Image (spheres, rainbow, N blue to C red):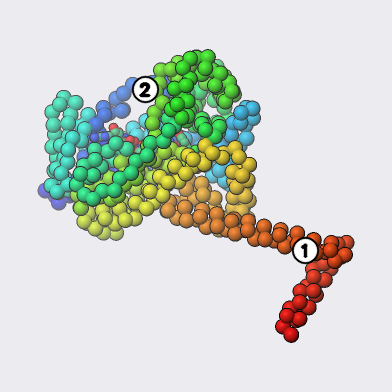
């Protein structure tokens, strides 16, 4: 509960990316913040070379980092990606820029990001962090939480606000499900992901073009690679679990990569590919949507705990970071009155987070179905042409999602408007074509086919006027 000085006491459950950033947001408000993380302190863990995992940080996440003065320090530790580099099956590479004037997304190391944010949180005198503390139970009436330590001892706290930043399998969300009328939906997709690594070359250079998000799109499966500061690329393979299972021998694996990702073999290295593939398990990807995000004035969930999404937009962390901005804005608006700010947070954020989960799932389906199809590429080209012609009116979907802070549900509304315009344009183009065909046929029949279009139209207008006058008389 509020301590002697009347400061609000907040427990942040989960010291991952969102929990660590949220601790900075809450500390800046003057709360007494305690962060409880079930795992050991990652800063004391040994760094295993070639095992780095990276993430795409875009404007939404950067704005949240900026609000707590952490954007610059993180950006310095990242690599800008100005374009996608599409690797086709023949090994040909084709860049597709993210936008004009050097628009980019940042490749940042997940562990480094988490460590820097934990360090930043601990800089605040009103923040304390605890590791090896796992949420065991909590009571949303009293604000009581029980943590189990790795020595099997329990620690209890009674706080003003319980914040669930404990990820996709959140214990705080689980307790919410038992407490209030809680809508919950989770979907596992049939694809799994496996992380591989493209090391630097023999003379310690990047093995591929540096400032690109490398993609090997193969419809049913794909690979994606983001650069690291150590000149390696963290490469993620996305495939159906049954396809992983079907590759039982090294020969089968190598044949598959020869057929589908031939140019990646010398980059990954045959031994690394075999060793990693047969010593790792493909991991599942889940999409979770739920409502509400709060209970009374005592608890709120954010980040993957509230809206885990498939990674096919690179927005999960960016969305969770943006959650911190939205909650802070609500606390500002309601002068830190949790009984008002929390319901307002759910009302504002829930439609946007659900929209982002849907967009990511939609992109997963689209990437599988059509990334190489002419229609898909035509739409991309049309989008970019119209964006060039009408930059304030026609903003492509991925641009609104990854390069603006347009509310996610509004991104979908914009896209639906664009689809309607193109559909209507398609119809009217078809209509115009139909009229043109009729005109040409009429011209041929009336012997005027060798006149100019202008003469043809004035001739036909004359016939139409006669027809209207005779109809009137
Ligand atoms: C393959 C892949 C690629 C991705 N790429 C991107 C990308 O490019 N860009 C992007 O924005 N997002 C990306 N994401 C999504 C991103 O990783 C997540 O959205 C982000 O990590 C969510 O952060 P979080 O803090 O909410 O949850 P987590 O990062 O899962 O952190 C939750 C923390 O809570 C702790 N915890 C769990 N249970 C308890 C408990 N009971 N008690 C105490 N602590 C607990 C965990 O140990 C963990 O430290 C990707 C995800 C995947 C799977
Ligand atoms: C670490 O693991 C991962 C896994 C997946 C992603 C990322 C990191 C980062 N991701 C980004 N996606 C976009 C995007 O808007 N779209 C539509 C794309 C979606 C897909 Cl699936 C793709 F392959 C390219 C683009 C693209 O446009 O480049 C960004 Cl912008 S960044 C996806």
Residue 329, percent across and down?
32, 54
Q: What is the crowding at mark 1: few (fewer than 14 residues within 10 Å), some, or many (at least 20)?
A: some
For the C terminus, the quadrant is bottom right
Upstream in sequence: badge 1 or badge 2: 2
Task: Give the camera-side residue of 299 and 211.
Answer: 299
Of residues 122 and 381, the one drawn nearer to the viewer in this rendering? 381
The residue drawn where x is 28% and y is 50% is 292
Residue occupying image coordinates x 63% and y 42%: 374
Q: Which mark is residue 47?
A: 2
Looking at the rendered structure, which numbered label has been put on residue 250? none
Q: Is residue 286 visible?
A: yes
Q: Residue 305 in the image: x percent, y percent?
A: 30, 41
Does 209 sit above or below residue 292?
Answer: above
The residue labelled by disc 1 is 439
Residue name at image x 54 percent, y 44 percent: 103
Mark 2 C-beta closer than 8 Å to ligand 1: no
**Is residue 239 rendered to the left or right of residue 99?**
left
Q: Secondary structure at mark 2?
A: loop
Determine the secondary structure under disc 1: helix
- Select label 1 or label 2 by which is in front: 1
Image label count: 2
Query: Is residue 436 rendered to the left or right of residue 225?
Result: right
* Mark 1 CB lies closer than 8 A to ligand 2: no
Residue 159 lies, with reference to residue 229, above or below; the image says below
Residue 342: give x, y in percent of width and height.
26, 53
Quarter of the view holding residue 369: top right
- Name the outermost residue toward the left: 4
Q: CA gap, disc 1 to disc 2?
A: 73 Å
Q: Residue at x 18, y 35 (%)?
A: 136
Q: Are marks 1 and 2 in contact (CB under 8 Å)?
A: no
* Viewer-nearest residue: 224 or 69: 224
**Residue 71 shows up from this direction:** no
């Amino acid at each position: 509960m509020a301590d002697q000085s009347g400061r609000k006491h907040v427990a942040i459950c989960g010291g991952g990316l969102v929990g660590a950033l949220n601790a900075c947001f809450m500390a800046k408000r003057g709360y007494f913040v305690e962060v409880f993380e079930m795992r050991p302190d990652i800063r004391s863990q040994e760094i295993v070379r070639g095992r780095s995992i990276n993430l795409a940080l875009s404007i939404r996440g950067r704005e949240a980092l900026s609000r707590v003065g952490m954007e610059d320090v993180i950006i310095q530790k990242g690599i800008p990606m100005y374009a996608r580099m599409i690797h086709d099956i023949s090994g040909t590479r084709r860049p597709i820029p993210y936008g004009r004037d050097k628009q980019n997304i940042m490749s940042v190391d997940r562990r480094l990001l988490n460590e820097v944010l934990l360090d930043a949180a601990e800089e605040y005198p009103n923040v304390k962090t605890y590791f090896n503390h796992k949420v065991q139970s909590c009571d949303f009436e009293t604000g009581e939480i029980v943590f189990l330590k790795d020595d099997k001892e329990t620690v209890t706290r009674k706080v003003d606000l319980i914040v669930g930043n404990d990820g996709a399998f959140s214990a705080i969300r689980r307790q919410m499900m038992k407490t209030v009328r809680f809508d919950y939906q989770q979907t596992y997709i049939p694809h799994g992901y496996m992380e591989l690594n493209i090391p630097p070359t023999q003379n310690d250079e990047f093995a591929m073009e540096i400032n690109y998000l490398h993609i090997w799109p193969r419809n049913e499966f794909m690979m994606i690679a983001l650069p690291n500061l150590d000149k390696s690329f963290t490469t993620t393979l996305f495939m159906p679990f049954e396809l992983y299972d079907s590759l039982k021998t090294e020969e089968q694996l190598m044949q598959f990569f020869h057929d589908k990702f031939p140019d990646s073999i010398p980059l990954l290295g045959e031994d690394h590919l075999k060793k990693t593939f047969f010593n790792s398990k493909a991991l599942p990807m889940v999409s979770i949507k739920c409502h509400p995000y709060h209970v009374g004035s005592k608890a709120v969930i954010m980040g993957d705990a509230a809206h885990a999404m498939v990674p096919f937009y690179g927005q999960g962390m960016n969305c969770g970071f943006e959650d911190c901005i939205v909650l802070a804005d609500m606390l500002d608006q309601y002068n830190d009155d949790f009984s008002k700010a929390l319901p307002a947070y759910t009302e504002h954020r829930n439609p946007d987070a659900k929209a982002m989960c849907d967009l990511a799932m939609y992109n997963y389906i689209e990437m599988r179905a059509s990334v190489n199809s002419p229609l898909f590429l035509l739409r991309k080209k049309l989008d970019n042409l119209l964006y060039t012609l009408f930059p304030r009116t026609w903003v492509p979907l991925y641009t609104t999602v990854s390069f603006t802070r347009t509310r996610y549900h509004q991104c979908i509304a914009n896209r639906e408007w664009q689809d309607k315009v193109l559909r209507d344009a398609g119809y009217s183009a078809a209509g115009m074509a139909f009229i043109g065909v009729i005109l040409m046929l009429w011209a041929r029949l009336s012997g005027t086919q060798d006149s100019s279009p202008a003469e043809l139209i004035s001739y036909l207008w004359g016939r139409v006027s006669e027809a209207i006058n005779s109809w009137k008389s």
